[in-house]
Amino acid sequence: MSLKLNTKYLENFIGEHEYQAVAHQVTAAHKILEDKSGLGNDFLGWVNLPTDYDKDEFERIKAAAARIKEKCDVLIVIGIGGSYLGARAAIEFLKSSFYNNLKKDTPDIYFVGNNISPAYLNEVLSICEGRDVCVNVISKSGTTTEPALAFRIFKKLLEDKYGKEEAKTRIFATTDKAKGTLKKLSDEEGYETFVVPDDVGGRFSVLTAVGLLPIAAAGCDIDKLMAGAREGQKKYSADDGNDCYKYAAIRNILYGKGKSVEMLVSYDPAFTMMGEWFKQLFAESEGKDNKGIFPAAATFSTDLHSLGQFIQDGSKIMFETVMHIKTPQSDIFLEPDKDNLDGLNFLTNQNMSVVNEKAYQGTILAHTEGGVPNIVIDVDKLDEENLGELIYFFEKACAISGYMLGVNPFNQPGVESYKKNMFALLGKPGYESQKADLEAKLG
């Protein structure tokens, strides 16, 4: 198991004196994170989570996942933001972006409640027809619009299909430990419940029951996942120039040079949803007070035929963080073709992963020579231990980077603005005074 930061391709962009210049900021950020004296200090439960997690609940998660695998063909995971992105990213990282299409002894998993599209929901409902279904609804409050709407629909589906008594054995609620609408309903109906910890924000919650139950239901080894996270906790616990803190420092140095967009890049489609998780983690954590690096993501070589043009020749507002996965999950040996009509015989008599590696090498040289700084994170392979460490690496780097930026990395005040307008326009009680003003602005 190994995760390593490679700064070789930053040498023409950052001098050693610049690392030294921000060292005191890294130390200060480390101190307020460790002594819990910084902004948002009531949401630091994730810091020691890999060692301090609830061991009894962890065993219940594994037991529930086993029952889900036994009882259902389809698991519907209902949640939005951090309540679904981490689980989906982990499943695709560890299994495949084609997880639902593979032959396996685990249920298909579909994620709903992360949008308000009726077409999307109807399509998932049609997929469930004639199949045995379980539901994992994830919401601290139970009143967030998108997942609450989806849960209404799937709760009715289960009760109509199985009756209330059987339905309640197929519904698993991940929610607040003591309060909230979903907790109250779960207690009344008899759903098995798992806890969203009070001191862990949604985007930092993938290593809690929020992410672990769907991940385990997909057949992933969550013991190894937590072992990898513990390795990350151990490696990135001291202010000693570790790779996690150096990555946070690099981000802030480049931001100070006008690099306001970070492009997370991988050369494996299995990493695509990790890019989506990364975007939420950093966008909600750093994008406030008119500050922040805009997080974006791309999959190469696919996006080299589109975004590659902008990265190479466009305005120099970005840097790239490249996930270099050293060992593919599988490979293909390229055999020569006797006619060679496509002229590609020069690629043959070797594995396809070699071609992908040369694409990575050629691209990183082109982009850095074109004025785009590149950070490389080397990962041995796509497995549970590496994923656990990687999750912890990004979470802690995000916290350190946010404190260096001078923001609260653990709140998200801007997320509420659209909700207030939407509620007013929909006529939610208590928003009557705003409704007319908003409708007038819309014309």
Image (tube, grey):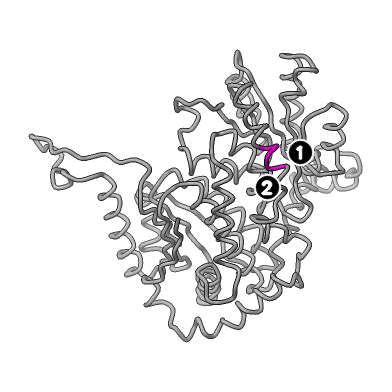
Numbered mark located on residue 208 in the image? 2
Label located before the other in sequence (2 or 1): 1
Pinpoint residue 18: horizontal percent, then vertical percent.
49, 83
Q: What is the three-letter code of the residue carrying label 2?
A: Thr
Q: From the viewer's perspective, tell me whether residue 179 is left or right of residue 342.
A: right
Circle 2 packing at 10 Å, graded few (<14), some (14-19), many (20+), is: many
SS for callout 1: helix
Q: Decide which of 124, 395 is in the foreground and name it.
A: 395
Magenta part of the chain: 57-61
Pinpoint residue 263: horizontal percent, then vertical percent.
47, 59
Residue 100 lies, with reference to residue 18, above or below; the image says: above
Q: Decide which of 292, 325 is in the foreground and name it.
A: 325
Q: Decide which of 13, 7 is in the foreground and name it.
A: 7
Q: From the viewer's perspective, tell me whether residue 373 is left or right of residue 31.
A: left
Residue 304 lies, with reference to residue 115, above or below; the image says: below
Quarter location, residue 432: top right
Given contact means CB atoms under 8 Å apart, are the residues at marks 2 and 1 in contact? Answer: no
SS for callout 2: loop
Residue at far left of view: 338
Q: What is the three-letter code of the residue carrying label 1?
A: Thr
Q: Residue at x 27, y 39 (%)?
A: 332
Reply yes or no: does residue 268 show up in magenta: no
Provide the residue designation for mark 1: 145
